[in-house]
Amino acid sequence: MTASYQDKGFATRAVRAGQKRTLEAEQSEPIFPTSSYVFDSAEQAAARFSGDEKGNVYSRFTNPTVRTFEQRLAALEGAECSVATSSGMSAILSTFMGLLAAGDHIVSSRSIFGTTRILFDKYLTKFGVDTNYVALTDIEDWQRAIKPNTKALFLETPSNPLNEIADLSALSALAKAHDCLLIVDNCFCTPALQQPLALGADIVVHSATKYIDGQGRCIGGAVVGDAQLVGEQVYGFLRTAGPTMSPFNAWTFLKGLETLELRMKAHSTAALQVAQWLEQQANVTQVFYAGLTSHPQHGLAKQQQSDFSGIVAFEVKGGKAAAWKVINATELLSITANLGDTKTTITHPATTTHTRLTDEERLESGITGGLLRLSVGLETVVDIQHDLQRGLDSL
Ligand SMILES: *Cc1c(COP(=O)(O)O)cnc(C)c1O
């Protein structure tokens, strides 16, 4: 972080941190589309390559636009350091490739992004890293699953799609007691609503594709933490293997960070209104949103988060057929599994995001046939409600 912004408020850091004006005195951050950098002399080239002199060499290693994004995100998460990646998945891959070795073990929440689960089960296992799954909210389950070779606890909170909340302070204490790292995918809340490092997490990973962009344009990710774990170990893998962020995408995400707090507040306000309205609908059996007082972990969510984000799950009477009917009756909402966009999206988790799970795993995760997930966007709330009402009334 640029030192002068350390004592500033979140919104100030979101707009200003990491910017280093060039001699052109530009107001907005420039994009540097360059693959390599030139040196003043052979001596300087040698010094840069040996690491004796700091500075740009090649954009797989560093790029000024990407660095601005990294420094700004680190400033928002309250971290020493962040590294940007080509996607959320490559952020997770780079974290484990950088920090783990064959024979290590991961304990992960069962309620994680489906592709993360495939990464663990199909690919990390090939390199001798095994994962066991536990219930996100059951601390004893986590404790029982930890083995002598466990190196990392991995989770998302709030979870997708049911908005279960992990107790980050308790899990951080557990991780420390067993000498392993607590790694939190902070995709749903972003640092605008939740800062896991302050609650004891060691590393935060992001899919910047979601709320950090916020307008559905680019794929990207980031790993956030201290200068050793992230700045050296994860970065070391990243600059070698190469899933780095492009300067254009970094610029898009930078602009996303500038409005992040405003957008997250607006998404949260709209999502609460939609969730409260859904609770009143006759054909809705349950609404899963941590901002509702009916949510079993509303109190914990209030302690850890400054708001509840934009993801609302709800279950309709009549199983899959009814859920599909609600989706097909929409005219305004986007039928897509992406989330964190200004445009409200609706999806049927059981047949999309969670389709690869077995029937048993799906039920264990609470993904029933009648479950629908909304990512509430920034349209006028009554328009979102009317679009859902048509389908709900037809059941
Ligand atoms: C989308 C998502 C990812 C993966 O990010 P990509 O940018 O699609 O690679 C990881 N975790 C969560 C919680 C996500 O929603």
Image (tube, rainbow, N blue to C red):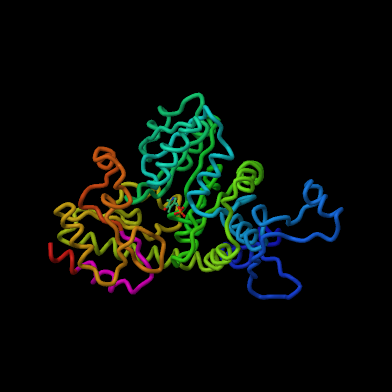
What is the quadrant of the N terminus in the image? bottom right
Residue pictured at 33% horizontal, 51% vertical: 353
Return the residue nearer the eye: 165 or 394: 394
Residue pictured at 48% horizontal, 41% vertical: 169
Question: 390 left or right of 15?
Answer: left
Image height check: is 52 above or below 391?
Answer: above
Is 201 colored magenta in this rendering?
no
Is 388 colored magenta in this rendering?
yes
Across and down, in percent, residue 67 comes to 65, 58
Across and down, in percent, residue 222 comes to 55, 52
Across and down, in percent, residue 93 comes to 51, 44
Across and down, in percent, residue 11 comes to 56, 65
Q: Quadrant of residue 200?
A: top right
Question: 324 left or right of 41?
Answer: left
Image height check: is 379 above or below 289?
Answer: below
How many numbered markers are drawn?
0
Question: 165 left or right of 229?
Answer: left
Q: Quadrant of residue 254?
A: bottom right
What is the quadrant of the C terminus in the image? bottom left
Image height check: is 258 above or below 54?
Answer: below
- Residue pushed farthest top? 148
Return the residue nearer the eye: 298 or 285: 285
Return the residue nearer the eye: 323 or 48: 48
**Magenta region:** 374-389
